[in-house]
Amino acid sequence: MRFLAAVVLCGLWVASPSDARAGDPCPIDFAVYDFGTPSWLDRDKTLAALSSRSYWTGVSIYEYEGEPRIYFVYDGTPAKAAGVFIGDRILSVAGVPVRDTDGAFAAFDTVDHQREFDLVVRRGDETKTLKLHRVLRDPFVTALAQADHGGWDCVTVDKKVPPSVDAAAFKTAVFGKGRRFQCKTAHKALRKVIPDAHQHDGQVVVVRGRRRILISLVGRTTRCVAASDYDGSLLTEQRLVSLFFEIAESLVAYRHAHP
């Protein structure tokens, strides 16, 4: 998977005839933040128990002057530990020469997650060989960010690095005083914990529990869904886009009303 809501299209908001709007609301950007699992859960064990699998090394890739390069290196990942730098030009992955971003994605995706492999990069005037391996990441977040939201035309959904937040305040906002998701109140509390969230950009927070997943459009709405409903054969693009529409429609409506 890579990066119907039939009622929302950029340039077309299907509602009452009186819903006139001025200007262009596009683009409408959404950032998906993976806040992992609660501190009392073993994240790797939780992800390993799923039928769905998603692996990564901890980098994002972009194309610069026709060449695949490292766009970002995520903290706490194999790539960070191996010394991968932002801007590194990717030459080969596990012995496979890489010439463009599609080739880089394909090479990373085919590496056996159970073994270490060589990442060869060009950094300045030097060629470096770095040792990497792939680890589990949340397949729900990966699939949500990579789903085709083309039905919304100008809506973009990207996985981003979670902003720095007060851990204790975040825990209180999401879990209250216990170990249960506070789905009815988290959407208000998270607005205080993540002050960067504002009405023109959608900040989507995902937290995975053992049996449920909390997904919140910060400051607007929050839902808790059964983890089993988005795993294996049920983790489909159609289901993800439908869920995302339910979460995001209030912001999309706002943007159309206030372009």
Image (spheres, rainbow, N blue to C red):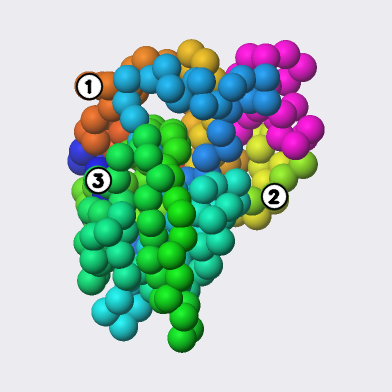
- The answer to whether residue 202 shows anywhere in this view is no
Of the residues under marks 1 and 3, which one precedes in the sequence?
Answer: 3
Quadrant in which the C terminus appears = bottom left
Compared to residue 116, the image places residue 221 above or below, namely above
Near-viewer residue (136 or 120): 120
Q: Residue at x 46, y 54 (%)?
A: 131
Q: Is there a contact, CB below 8 Å, between mark 3 and mark 2? A: no
- Report the residue marked by disc 2: 164
Q: Residue at x 24, y 45 (%)?
A: 110
Which portion, as a residue range, is magenta? 167-187
Near-viewer residue (24 or 194): 194
Amino acid type, callout 2: Ser
Of the residues under marks 3 and 2, which one precedes in the sequence?
Answer: 3
- Report the residue marked by disc 1: 233
Q: Tell us which disc is closer to us: 3 or 2.
A: 3
Query: Real-space Cα distance between discs 2 and 1?
Result: 34 Å
Relative to 232, 48 lies left or right: right
Residue 124: give x, y in percent of width and height: 48, 83
Indicate the secondary structure of the residue bearing disc 2. loop
Amino acid type, callout 1: Ser
Query: Real-space Cα distance between discs 1 and 3?
Result: 21 Å
Q: Is residue 180 magenta?
A: yes
